[in-house]
Image (cartoon, rainbow, N blue to C red):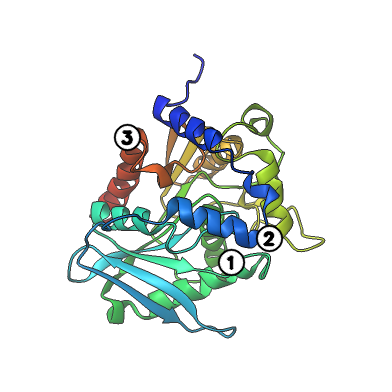
Amino acid sequence: MTAVLDPQALALLEVVDAAGLPPIQTLSVQLARERMRAALNTRGEPLALAGVEDLQVPTAWGSLRMRLYRPVAGALPLALFMHGGGWTINDLDTHDELCRRLARRSGWLVASLDYRRAPEHRHPAALEDAYVAYRWLVDNAERIESHPQTRALVGESSGATTAAALTLLLRDGGGPMPTYQALAYPMMDVPGSWPSYVERGTGYTLDRDLVDWFIGHCLPVGYDATDPYLFPLHAPDVSGLPPTLVMTAEFDPLRDEGVAYAQKLLEAGNAVRHVHAGDQMHGFLLFGKALRRAGELIDQLGDALAAHGA
């Protein structure tokens, strides 16, 4: 059966095309960040929660901003959320609406991390920040009113890559493991390694040129393409990992590597749920207000967290 893009997603692409804006990859990093903030920042009254709090996480290289989304009072399961944007663009505000919706739907305390971005800070800066923030959350469970034994790593796009890498790092280092991980359309392998880069590499929200622009900013010279903490699909052993939700999109150059990682986890004996959105494109979690189907997928992610927390 031939895959068909969601008509609402197609209409969204047509609106973007009609605007005649230059592609993100032709802009400076600063202009690209401003463009995405203008497109994604919440307009109007944000979704109400019991509490939303910005705090500072201390590190050896300075404080990191983190935003806690509390749907109800009391001790709650905790999810560390890593936003996407090729490790280069986007921030807490571009993903504020998504985090509010996930917190409200799941009943979890969602902690969104404002990690250091490239090109000012290249790999492994984002992973280092995620590790420190995660350990801080675990150590301060009582202070922030979270369940110490129910915790997840959640990420979308490059943030999902970092979440998967952190889970591997914690397992390999004997750290306190998350009890769940949710990875939405992650980059898991060297760009261009899979057929979906040819099949879905142009015409959607993420294309091959933009991927190359991100990679050029975030990776250091001489990076190791087989580093599992950079491209988790290269991990020689993925056993002993927590239950995992992998979400992929048909109209996405990253499609195949996400599917491959879900399969690799399953073959290693892990509990895996793979949700393939056959009518969606990369970034669908950010389109919950514009696309009915995207909203349903956000709710699926929230429901998966709720089920694990229960």
Which type of secondary structure does the marked residue at label 2 adopt? helix
Measure the alpha-carbon separation of dots 2 and 1. Answer: 10 Å
The answer to whether 204 appears left or right of 226 in the picture is left
Nearer to us: label 3 or label 2: 3
**Residue 288: image location, x then y, percent:** 35, 43
Q: Residue at x 54, y 54 (%)?
A: 35
**Residue 129: image location, x then y, percent:** 55, 72
Q: Residue at x 71, y 47 (%)?
A: 212
Q: Label 1: few (<14), some or many (≥20) within 10 Å?
A: many
**Pointer 1 residue:** 126
Amino acid at pointer 3: Arg
Asked whether the residues under the numbered discs 2 and 1 touch, taking CB atoms below 8 Å apart as contact, a structural biologist would say yes
Amino acid at pointer 1: Ala
Sequence-first tag of 2 and 1: 1
Which type of secondary structure does the marked residue at label 1 adopt? helix
Q: Label 2: few (<14), some or many (≥20) within 10 Å?
A: many
> 151 and 199: which one is in front?
199
